[in-house]
Amino acid sequence: MPMTRRLLLAATASLPGLGAAPAWAQGEMTVAFAGSMGVVMDRGLGPAFSARTGVGFQGIGQAAMGLAHLLAGKALVADVFVSVSAAPVRVVEAAGLTSRGVAFASTEMVLAYAPESAFAARLAKAGADWRAILTAPGFRLGRTDPASDPQGQYVLYALQLAEAYYKLPGFAARVAGAVENPAQIFAEPSLLARLQNGQIDATLTYRSAAVSQHLPFIELPPEINLSDPAMAGDWYGRAALELHGETLHPSPLVFYAAVLRNAPNPRAAAAFVAFLRGAAGQRILARDGYGPGKGEDI
């Protein structure tokens, strides 16, 4: 049985309730996680795990693909890596730092908008034609950098799928412009701050992020929201991006956690991954808008 699997099984067996912490529960643990999870990690999962085990929690939330490359290049050392979508975990796996990504949560793309936006009243109406609003004069869309952040890629995938689903030729390009359009691209924390302050009108984002930030949003059909593993091949696979000479396709929006082979505190790392999949972790995730893990582990 692989070492990571043995650690996860041992951690699951030894996780306490609120009683005495296990003998290994000491020191600190670092989790490098997709930046969209900032609220649930820093205010929910991290403190709850520390209270449960006595292990100090240190979180590093940034664009998942950027984190993956930092970890792979040994410029960053962490105990656990948490990614949304499979691609960043594959980068860490290729560097020999993990052999397994555990599916523990899921989300979907939604259209979140600023309550202070001049377009908010139109977007809030039941059955709003959000496609027409996104192409209206003066509408300001924000997104993250697709070169470093999976969420930035998924904005473009969702727009391509909307173009195909609603049969709107040229829709994605009219809304987003170039793949790396500097007029729309912001770092993730800055993007959400600008949205909350009304400096941009809307963004396509994860439902979990919109719920965590208390932002109003419009739900999108499964054909567009990239949440359904059953649509992964024939339908979602038609969306594609060309980035730095590589053709990328989306996988369903599933969150994966991986114990890293160079983890300074590997037993705590395994326990944290087990906690994410357990009842207490799942309750915290559900409270902040996350769905259960879908599909198979990596």
Image (cartoon, rainbow, N blue to C red):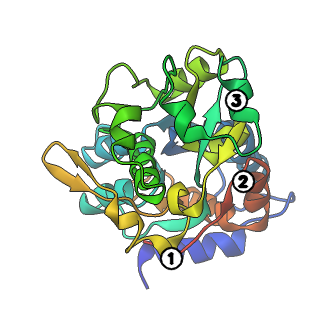
Q: Identify the mark nearer the N-term, 1 or 3.
A: 3
The residue where tag 1 is placed is 230
The residue where tag 3 is placed is 122
Q: What element carries label 3?
A: helix
Which class describes the residues within 10 Å of circle 2: few (<14), some (14-19), or many (20+)?
Answer: many
Q: What kind of residue is marked 2?
A: Leu
Who's the residue at 61% across and 75% down the image?
10
- 278 is higher (above) or lower (below) than 165: below
Q: State the separation of the CA atoms marked 1 and 3.
A: 33 Å
Point out the residue furthest to the right here: 19
Q: State the separation of the CA atoms marked 2 and 1.
A: 23 Å
Q: Identify the mark nearer the N-term, 2 or 1.
A: 1
- 15 is higher (above) or lower (below) than 178: below
Point out the frontmost of discs 2 and 1. 1
Front position in the image: 278 or 220: 220
Quadrant (top left, top right, bottom left, bottom right) of the N terminus = bottom left
Point out the frontmost of discs 3 and 2. 3
Whether residue 28 is visible to the viewer of this picture, yes or no, is no
Point out the frontmost of discs 1 and 3. 3
Who's the residue at 45% across and 31% down the image?
143
Q: Do the residues labelled 1 and 3 touch (CB within 8 Å)?
A: no
On the image, the x and y values in percent for residue 189 come to 54, 25
Q: What kind of residue is marked 3?
A: Arg
The residue where tag 2 is placed is 285
Is residue 253 left or right of 169 when viewed as pictured? right
Q: What kind of residue is marked 1?
A: Ala
